[in-house]
Image (cartoon, coloured by chain):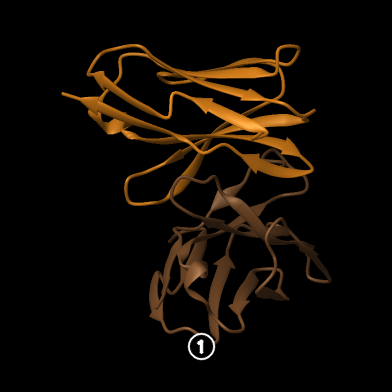
Amino acid sequence: DADVTQTPRNRITKTGKRIMLECSQTKGHDRMYWYRQDPGLGLRLIYYSFDVKDINKGEISDGYSVSRQAQAKFSLSLESAIPNQTALYFCATSDSGGSSYNEQFFGPGTRLTVL
Amino acid sequence: KNEVEQSPQNLTAQEGEFITINCSYSVGISALHWLQQHPGGGIVSLFMLSSGKKKHGRLIATINIQEKHSSLHITASHPRDSAVYICAVRQGNLIFGKGTKLSVKP
């Protein structure tokens, strides 16, 4: 089983709809991240969380919100989707200690299309 | 100006060739990461380094902190190495380059 999973893997929605992307991990990591990837651009950080009670805005948080329901779960919401939020979204995790300290482990990605 | 620049943007090689992908950055960093994005979209971490050189199989990553430059080398390239290779620098959180798309022809 994959260590970092994302649901759904693909989603087509309409402008104005609320949508939630979910991320779960079995790695036991305390840190979780949401990124978006657009063609021709590097990955950009939307939100990150260093533990259940810690939520931080990233570079491009406008139009997004997140919820860290448990150490293993981190959800990204688009309250009112717009076409320029069409992108590939990645969840990632990292450990604040241990042998893999600061190495990031990525989920498989969610391809979101907003019509 | 982008804080992380990769070159080349696209690279086509013949199987067996030695490949070099470069990454230059303009900010102070605590570490540099090389990632591989498969054609299906999945991303895996290849290396994380803060000095010197690391080797894993046919892949070698080097970093020169003074020159703010890192290279990823692939020896004896193979079509299965075809992917996008992404450089990212750690300055608190990660700052990503735009990636280098590598295609290795048989």
Give the colour in which the image draws chain B.
Answer: orange
- Which residue extends farthest front? B1
Q: In which quadrant is the N terminus of chain B drawn?
A: top right
- The amino acid pointed to by label 1 is Lys
Rendered residue at 44%/58% (across/down): A108
Left or right of A38 on screen, residue A9: left
Q: Which residue is mark 1?
A: A17
Location of residue B47 (image quadrant):
top right
Question: Chain drawn brown, letter?
Answer: A
> How many labels were placed on the picture?
1
Quadrant of image for the C terminus of chain B = top left
Report x, y in % for residue B64.
68, 13
Image coords of residue A22 (percent x, y): 55, 74
Residue at figure coordinates x 67%, y 60% from the top left:
A60
List x then y, in percent, for residue B95: 66, 41
Q: Is residue B93 above or below residue B48?
A: below
Q: Chain of mark 1?
A: A
Binning the other alpha carbons within 10 Å of mark 1 as few (below 14), some (14 to 19) or many (20 upward) gives few
